[in-house]
Image: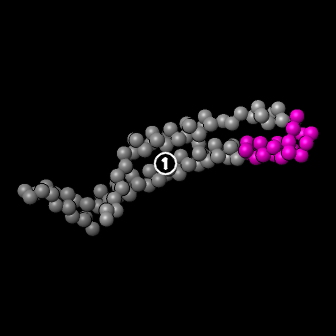
Amino acid sequence: MEKEVFMDTNVFTQIVGDIQSAADNLVLSDSALKNSDCLNGFPAGVEIIEALKEVHTTSKLYRYEAAVALPKGLLTLRDSMIEVDESVSRSLRVDKTPGGVRIESKR
């Protein structure tokens, strides 16, 4: 079982940017909430208004998490993987030999 991760950081960064952009553009219209006064006259209408308020509150939270928190976490992950890769590559010595290559640890 291989325990290796290969990542094209440019593609990864573009995907994260696309996620961020899509989330930024996902804005739920509040027109239904603004026009909900007619629902106040009966109990089910009041519950509908409360549900609409909850949907708007959670959509704002979702948009923040998807547009800010998730991309920040993914980019931190990318940067950490790059740093680990650079650290590992600095710790190895690769020599070309007639039979191929020889890899030795610099430790």
Query: Is 28 in front, or is 88?
Result: 28
Q: Residue, x 63% and y 43% (percent of image)?
A: 63
Query: Is 58 in front, or is 13?
Result: 58
Q: Quadrant of residue 80?
A: bottom left
Extreme residue in the right direction: 41
Q: x, y percentage for residue 23?
A: 59, 39
Q: Residue, x 39% and y 45% (percent of image)?
A: 9
Is residue 100 found inside the magenta-colored segment of the image?
Answer: no
Q: x, y percentage for residue 8?
A: 36, 45
Extreme residue in the bottom direction: 107
Q: x, y percentage for residue 69?
A: 59, 49
Indicate whether 11 appears above or below 83: above
Extreme residue in the left direction: 98
**In this figure, which colouring scheme has been used for the structure?**
one colour
Disc 1, SS? helix
Q: Mark 1: which amino acid?
A: Leu
Which quadrant holds the N terminus?
bottom left
Residues shaded magenta: 38-57
Q: Residue, x 56% and y 37% (percent of image)?
A: 22
Indicate whether 50 appears above or below 25: below
Mark 1 neighbour density, 10 Å: few (under 14) some (14–19) many (20 or more): some
Q: x, y percentage for residue 28?
A: 69, 36
The dominant secondary structure in magenta is helix
Residue bearing the label numbered 1: 75
The answer to whether residue 18 is left or right of residue 89 is: right
Query: Is 58 in front, or is 85?
Result: 58
The answer to whether residue 62 is left or right of residue 44 is: left
Indicate whether 51 appears above or below 89: above
The answer to whether residue 54 is left or right of residue 96 is: right
Which quadrant holds the C terminus?
bottom left
